[in-house]
Amino acid sequence: GQNIDQPTEMTATEGAIVQINCTYQTSGFNGLFWYQQHAGEAPTFLSYNVLDGLEEKGRFSSFLSRSKGYSYLLLKELQMKDSASYLCAVMDSNYQLIWGAGTKLIIKP
Amino acid sequence: GAVVSQHPSWVICKSGTSVKIECRSLDFQATTMFWYRQFPKQSLMLMATSNEGSKATYEQGVEKDKFLINHASLTLSTLTVTSAHPEDSSFYICSARVPGMNTEAFFGQGTRLTVV
């Protein structure tokens, strides 16, 4: 079966750095996405990785290792507004998105 | 990025009534749209894939007679929750991808349905 694992919840301090991991097992791979979702709102796109390596976009970076079935989202200089759920999703061989359960990130002052 | 608009943002209905949720792609033509349901503190669950001009493809366990999907045009898909019950109360979200682009899905704002 297809499976995506990410931690349920993480806590970090304002101004610090946090890394949210995601491991996956899917039938085929056509890219991995990270989304941010605030409570009661729809997800918003953060990043897309299809090749191995690190993609940096401002305070957020995303890393992919296809051989390990592993990705992480790195958030730097954390702000209170970064408190949200972060969803990892993999596009399988049928171009369908398989979603992880999401990681709730709590930022403390 | 592309814009997907979903309406209404929230709705409260009585048990046994039907509710229609609209999903529109505003600046691109979406031959395929996706309907998700999300219960509190849970991940997105794909309910069905809506295909313009043809029948929707439902995921296992989703009742097609209860969740009616119509994709009559390239910019509009609707989800109708028929004979709603309190257990149907959830956050419903639609999304679409720009045709031919193997990239991110764009989401509507979501609809919070409460059945009383």
Image (cartoon, rainbow, N blue to C red):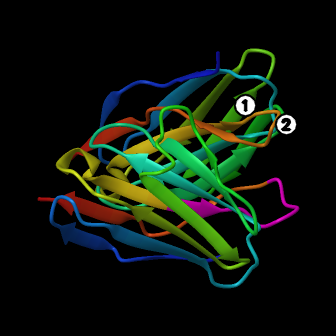
CB under 8 Å between callouts 2 and 1?
Answer: yes
Residue closest to the eye, A70 or A59: A70
Q: Which residue is mark 2?
A: A51
Q: Is residue A54 above or below residue B113?
A: above
User: How many other residues sit within 10 Å of disc 1, few (<14), some (14-19) or many (≥20)?
Assistant: many
Q: Would you call the spot at circle 2 few (<14 residues within 10 Å), some (14-19), or many (20 or more)?
A: some
Relative image position of residue B22 (x, y in whole percent): 48, 75
Taking the image as drawn, is residue A77 in sight? no
Question: Which residue is identified by label 1?
Answer: A64
Circle 1: residue type: Leu
Boundaries of the magenta span: B94-102
Residue at image location 42% in from the left, 49% down from the top: B37
Circle 2: residue type: Leu
Q: Secondary structure at mark 1?
A: strand
The percent coordinates of residue A40 (x first, y second) are: 30, 59
Magenta stretch encompasses residue A20: no
